[in-house]
Amino acid sequence: MIISKSFGSRAFDAALIVILTVISAVTLFPILHTVAVSFSNPAIAGSGTITVLPKGLSLSAYTRVLDDKQFFSSLWVSVERIVITLALGTGVTYLAAFPFSRETRDFRMRNVYLWLLLIVSSFNGGIIPGYMNAKNLGLYDNFWILVLPYLFNFGNILLVFNFWRNLPKELDDCSNIDGAGPWTKLTHIYFPLSLPVLATISLFTIVNTWNEYFQAIVFINNPHLMPLQTYLQQIVVTIDPTRPEDISKAGGSLSEISNQTLDAAKISLTMLPILFVYPFLQRYFIHGITLGSVKE
């Protein structure tokens, strides 16, 4: 069917296209600029003349980051951390959200526990109490200190909880009539329906775990347990191109080392995993983040 549009409607469509194009350009420019800086000559990068194309093509920043066994060791630690946190954290979230999705007649203390978890998750005990607690529990310089604090995420629990609350109540009634218990409901009824929201919290967990670096700075001293983000952060912090001893330690010259290009290389490398993962979860992400936000 052909719909005749008025001049005002066509003008609105044109304005919308222009606005979306500008927003897309503004969004893409920092990414392209960062990648261009990472591939540019460090001396030229310091002049601030690079836009979206590299100048004086150089791989010295990537060589400095990649030409080290510690890089691959830290990469493996980050991959292990993400896989374990994703598997255990999703399980904890899934199991914790189920009782909160029940009616108060089935779980009388539901609201009390919800408020307690909300209060506890809103406050942080601080670095020093956390450090003392980790030492007493034997978690200092232990891989599990990178995983355990991130298994319980109240925000993800609320997301799954609201998702389930929006499902038809007849599902519960029918399963009760058929004699299905809680485990049967979790595995055979709710799990197939929860793929969108589980993909959403999985994406959140992957992004947050991949980008987190501070936990290892405080609790990890063994370089073999250092995540990739912490390792890359330490490169930028510990190498000062104005100090000759740092330059000789890095195995290069002042023209080959630049904090700006190293920062750009670090950002470029850390973007790659998310860029690969996000397209596979996008179709679930949009549906899962919106479903459950509006009650009918």
Image (tube, helix red, strand yellow):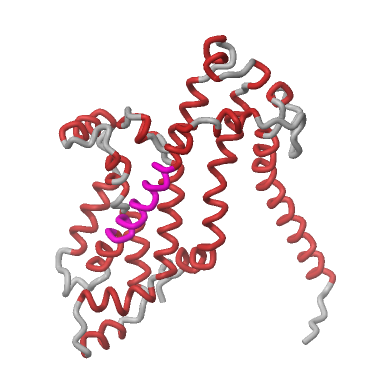
Magenta segment's dominant SS is helix
Residue 164 in the image: x percent, y percent?
34, 71
Look at the image and give the residue range highlighted in magenta.
76-92
* 248 up-or-down from 170: above or below: above
Identity of the residue drawn at 53% across and 67% down: 283
Q: Is residue 266 above or below residue 45?
A: below
Residue at left 21%, top 62%? Answer: 111
Toward which corner of the image does residue 194 lie, by quadrant?
bottom left
Quarter of the figure that contains the C terminus: bottom left
Q: How many marks?
A: 0
- Side of 212 relative to 126 (left or right): right
Q: Residue at x 30, y 56 (%)?
A: 88
List x then y, in percent, for residue 175: 25, 85
At a point 64% along the width and 28% down the height, the residue shown is: 60
Identity of the residue furthest to the right in this view: 7
Q: Is residue 292 left or right of residue 101?
A: right
Q: Is residue 90 magenta?
A: yes
Question: Can you say which quadrant of the picture contains the N terminus?
Answer: bottom right
Q: In the rendering, at what x and y percent does residue 209 appear?
A: 41, 46
**Residue 293 shown left or right of residue 138 in the figure:** right
Location of residue 30 with respect to 255 vertically, above or below: below
Quarter of the image for residue 6 reads: bottom right
Indicate whether 268 appears above or below 290: above
Report if residue 272 lies within the magenta region: no
Question: Horizontal and vertical percent for residue 80?
Answer: 37, 47
